[in-house]
Amino acid sequence: MAACSVAGLLLAAGGGRRFGMPKALVPWGPGLLVEHAAATLVDAGCDPVITVLGAAADEVRARSKLPGVVVDNPDWADGMGSSLRVGLTALGDCDAVVVLTVDTPGITAEAIRRFIAMAAPGALARASYDGVPGHPVLIGRDHWSGVAEAADGDTGARPYLARNRVTDVPCADIADGADADRPGDLPGRPHDQ
């Protein structure tokens, strides 16, 4: 993989137990939620964009047009931590990565650009929404091995972030960071284009 400065990493492997289906397959606008999230990373300027699939990966591939690199997490049932490790391994030679989860459709390209502007090998930053931490998360290359080691179950990077100095990036003015754990959590659906 060629060198890059800021990659985008989309975690979209979960089975969506509480949602009732894999969130990557949720219809959103003219396509699927996973396509919307990947396009948001592309629109923000992340390159490459890597999407980690797991549950129903073959169906997601068949029903979507995803940009960039798509990788499978065979251990997706172990939780988001395993998907984060798979994604970090696939990054190649980048300075930093912006991590986004598939179930945050209110994240905007403008919010992601705030993180791209801060990207550096030693960077560690997390979005906040009225003081509540959320996505996206910026992880500089210097932190990848530590994050991968700490990522376990559904905690992702949280244990590593708790032990290290993290820059808080308020994003409530330009994005909605709410997770859609259940169908009723989805914000109003965008109009088909």
Image (spheres, grey):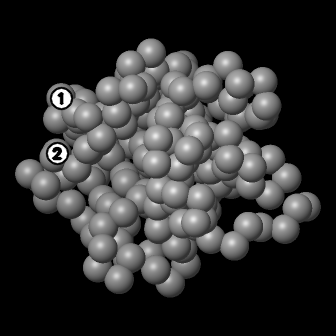
Q: Is residue 82 visible?
A: no
Q: CA distance from mark 2 to mark 1?
A: 9 Å
Q: Residue furthest left?
A: 163
| Quadrant of the rendering where the C terminus is positioned | bottom right
Residue at the image point whose x is 26% and y is 44% from the top: 155
Q: Is residue 84 left or right of residue 108?
A: left
**Residue 17, how many percent across, how many down?**
47, 41
Q: Is residue 119 left or right of residue 110?
A: left
Residue at the image point whose x is 30% and y is 73% from the top: 132
| Rendered position, 103 above or below 148 | below
Mark 1, secondary structure of its residue: helix
Mark 2, secondary structure of its residue: helix
Query: For residue 61, which numbered disc appears in the image?
Result: none
Check if mark 2's residue and mark 1's residue have beta carbons within 8 Å.
yes
Task: Give amino acid for label 1.
Answer: Glu
| Quadrant of the rendering where the N terminus is positioned | top right
Residue occupied by mark 2: 160
Q: How many marks?
A: 2
Q: Upstream in the sequence, badge 2 or badge 1? A: 1
Q: Is residue 41 left or right of residue 165?
A: right
Q: Residue furthest right?
A: 193
**Residue 70, how many percent across, how many down?**
60, 25
Q: Nearer the viewer, residue 42 or 51?
A: 51
Residue at the image point whose x is 48% and y is 35% from the top: 14
Q: Is residue 127 visible?
A: yes
| Rendered position, 87 above or below 137 | above
